[in-house]
Image (cartoon, rainbow, N blue to C red):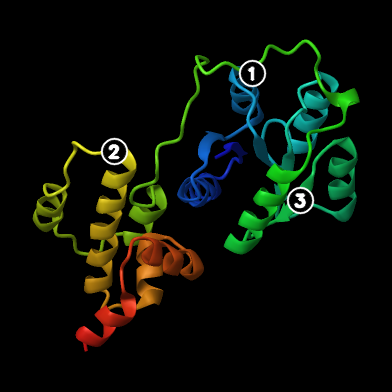
Amino acid sequence: MARILVVDDEIGIRELLSEILYDEGHTVELAENAAQARESRLRQRPDLVLLDIWMPDIDGVSLLKEWSSQGLLNMPVIMMSGHATVDTAVEATRIGAVDFLEKPITLQKLLKTVAAGLARPVIPASMRSRTERPASPADPVFTQPPALAGGPAVAQSMGTAPAAPATDDSHLGRISLNQPLREARDEFERIYFEYHLLHENHSMTRVSERTGLERTHLYRKLKQLGIDTSRKKSSGG
């Protein structure tokens, strides 16, 4: 699958996009500002970049211009913003962005736009670098680890709600560490979501709030993990 760089100063957006894209099989790198995005881009060219327009240090359009002027805009870039004007979107497209995502970003729109971006040819030859060193498998690359429990958003959403550490630890003790990361992650997530389904009486609204996932993504995640919510609802009364 693809190597995707997500550049956004909001941690919640970075974590959500990272989890969705990781579930699709992509390798995801994260950057919270233009400086980190530059470093990531120089380490190894991503197959696609999701770039926020409004950032505290250097805005996304300025970074896009910089990459274009330096011949580094040889990968599709999709701009993101919740406050951009039509003029800003047009300017980004003129510079070389292939598409624009308006926040809040829905699951279906994200996957459709990313797929279309990856299928498009790279930026025209006049904007490519002829001297850029080809990426090598040996180059260092930071791969974002999967957000097993939804990250800080989950901790914040749970607040001071009663916890059961002993029970949670006993669940985790059943996960074998002698297996590939993805299988271990799926096993953990299955336990995690079954726990919240049980403690929230299978209320998808409450589980969505507890886990920090929108309902559409939550339903998709439960289906992917093989958790039959309809059966569990009927058995739980």
Q: Which quadrant holds residue 44?
A: top right
Distance in Å between CA atoms under marks 3 and 2: 36 Å
Of mark 3 and mark 2, the one earlier in the sequence is 3
Distance in Å between CA atoms under marks 1 and 3: 23 Å
Nearer to the camera, 105 or 179? 179
Which amino acid type is shown beneath numbered disc 3? Phe
Q: Which residue is mark 2?
A: 180
Camera-side mark, 3 or 2 = 2
Q: Position of residue 151 (x, y in %)?
A: 38, 48
Q: Position of residue 141 (x, y in %)?
A: 50, 23
Q: Is residue 16 left or right of residue 96?
A: left
Q: Is residue 157 left or right of residue 5?
A: left
Quadrant containing the C terminus in the rendered view: bottom left
- Under circle 2, the secondary element is loop
Q: Which residue is mark 1?
A: 42
Distance in Å between CA atoms under marks 1 and 2: 29 Å
Q: Which residue is mark 3?
A: 100
Nearer to the camera, 183 or 11? 183
- Under circle 3, the secondary element is strand
Q: Is residue 8 left or right of residue 142?
A: right
Q: Is residue 53 visible?
A: no
Tell me: residue 12, above or below residue 38. below
